[in-house]
Amino acid sequence: MSQKRNIIPWLFIAPSLAIFTTFHFFPLAILVYASFTKWNLISPPQFIGLENYLKVISDDLFIKSLFITITFVFTSIIINVILSLGIALLTEKPNSKLATLCRFIIFIPYVLPDAASAGIWNLLFFPHPSSPVNVLLSQLGIGWQGWIEDKNLALPTIILYYIWKNVGFSTLVYVAGLKAIPKIFYDAAEVDGASRLDTIKYVIIPLLKPITLFILITSLISGWQSFTDIFVLTKGGPGTATTTLSIYIYHTAFGEGLAGRAAVAAIILFIITLALTIIQLRYIKSE
Amino acid sequence: MNKENKIKNLIGNLIILLIIIIFMFPLIFLILSSFKPYREIVSIPPTIIPKEFTLNNFIEIQKKIDLIRMTINTFIVASLITVSTLFLGTLAGYAFAKLQFKGKEKIFVLMMSKLMIPTMVLVIPWTFMMMRIGLIDSLLAIILPNLSGAWTIFFMRQYISQLPNELFDSARIDGAGEFTIFLRIILPLIKPALATATIINFLWGWNEFLWPLLVLTSKENFLLSIGVAFIKYSGGVMTEGTVNYAMLAAFSLIYSLPILLAYLLLARQFVQSIVLSGLKR
């Protein structure tokens, strides 16, 4: 009987463990092996030592893709945090139907599938005088822009997209955080005669620090890996203006057929994701 | 309320109203554009309400890439992934929560480490593996790696470990096997958790993009997600090389519609589930 009891837990976890091993852990080993080979995914790989590593770190496009990813992730996250804190403070009023409606509506872009929300953004910013954003610009007396097809505006357009897409989620997290602040803090601030602005600055923002950190780290991890939206909006273009690390890996492996070299970039992506996740776990534990 | 506060409140409400308008506009524009002919979208000035109401965009898409087939494919993939992940994930979550075995903590940490691997890292080896076993261009290639999920295991472990042990102990004394306990006692008790995991896994399945983009090559196997990219980069491209935005609108609308409707009907559950899932991907 006791023998049987020991086997049963393994039967319960075996299917999941088998799937993870086959499709997630084992492929990492293939990837590491591939990083030392010249390989186009079809013909047998040839061992070339560290050549891929040297090629990748001396590849201007790889370095550029790192910069683009960092610019895009940090800019969108910082604006997103400021904006969502503002909206959360504005809409936390418990009895306002308008505020509830607002939180409901700004969450829609986050719920939509990525490819669909990127499709919608494309519809607003398409490079033609009659796209909605260009019509608005011409009302303001500014000429129409190419947006996703303009090499200077493509990345800012994607950053705006990410803010529109994610601000609803961060707002909800902030609202939950605001609700958890005990009323006594507000009362104390009022007794001290603090203005609303001072209360926000010296009471609310410091108390929300753990929430802010949570939003920063989770958006950093997901933004760092983002692919779908950028692929649908620009495919990394025009030229290489929006080639993030993910687009670089995709293009190197499946466009140029250099799977070995792409494997090196993928390993770098993995290590950075790993580091970010470990920081997040440390932080969750310390809270 | 004094006068000053009233004015502040009014300004606050006006800003909220402005945010609502800014966020509603893209959705309304999407819906209206789906029923416009292309020339109305690019006319100067463009129309807002369609002058000529047409279903032609949907008909054209159906002709080009079989929208109905793609919708069915997406439903099949998202549903199978959801059912399988719920079943296998709950089984494992129960074992981690309530059963004792050697190396339990270590295996749990190992399985959770799957969450740290970006899909972009896996698709290179997956392409190679699927070529070897002949699953390129099959929906099975999408389903197999997603048959179970680390988040679901984690979530179920948390939920089940809150249930009191007495519930199962008496059944064990009565001689019930672990699997019977799982089916008869656990599953009925965790319905709210199953609902949350269903929403999350279906959303994720519906969202799958990168791997389908790489592994599915023939149109009859396409999913709606990659249909968007197809409409933008090949299917809907007009003769002069510009994208047919009317078709892109119609297609994005179809792809969003099931999720939008589910969100309208189940807003509270959606919000709770997504906040619980913490991180999207």
Image (cartoon, coloured by chain):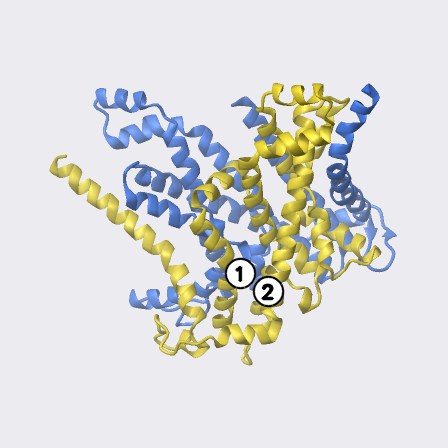
The residue tagged 1 is: B255
Is mark 1 in CB contact (under 8 Å) with mark 2? Answer: yes
Which percent across, then down, holds residue B141? 73, 54
Task: Relative to A280, say whether B86 is above or below.
Answer: below
> In yellow, which chain?
B
Give the residue at x 57% y 73%: B62
Which percent across, then down, holds residue B152? 62, 38
Q: Residues within 10 Å of mark 2 (few under 14, many from 20)?
A: many
Give the residue at x 59% y 34%: B188
Q: Is A130 left, or right, of B219 in this rendering?
A: left
Residue type at mark 2: give it.
Answer: Gly
Q: Chain of mark 1?
A: B
Q: CA distance from mark 1 to mark 2?
A: 9 Å
The residue tagged 2 is: B227
Task: Relative to A171, say whether A122 is above or below.
Answer: below
Quadrant of the frame with the C terminus of chain B? top right
Find numbered disc 2 in the image and state the secondary structure of the residue it sits on: helix
Task: Relative to A240, say whether B270 is above or below.
Answer: above
Q: Nearer the viewer, residue A146 or B167?
A: B167
Which percent across, then down, holds residue B263? 46, 50
Task: Relative to A25, say whether A124 is above or below.
Answer: below
Give the residue at x 81% y 19%: A2
Q: Chain of mark 2?
A: B
Give the residue at x 23% y 25%: A194
Q: Is B7 left, or right, of B190 in this rendering?
A: left
Find numbered disc 1 in the image and state the secondary structure of the residue it sits on: helix
> In blue, which chain?
A
Residue type at mark 1: give it.
Answer: Tyr
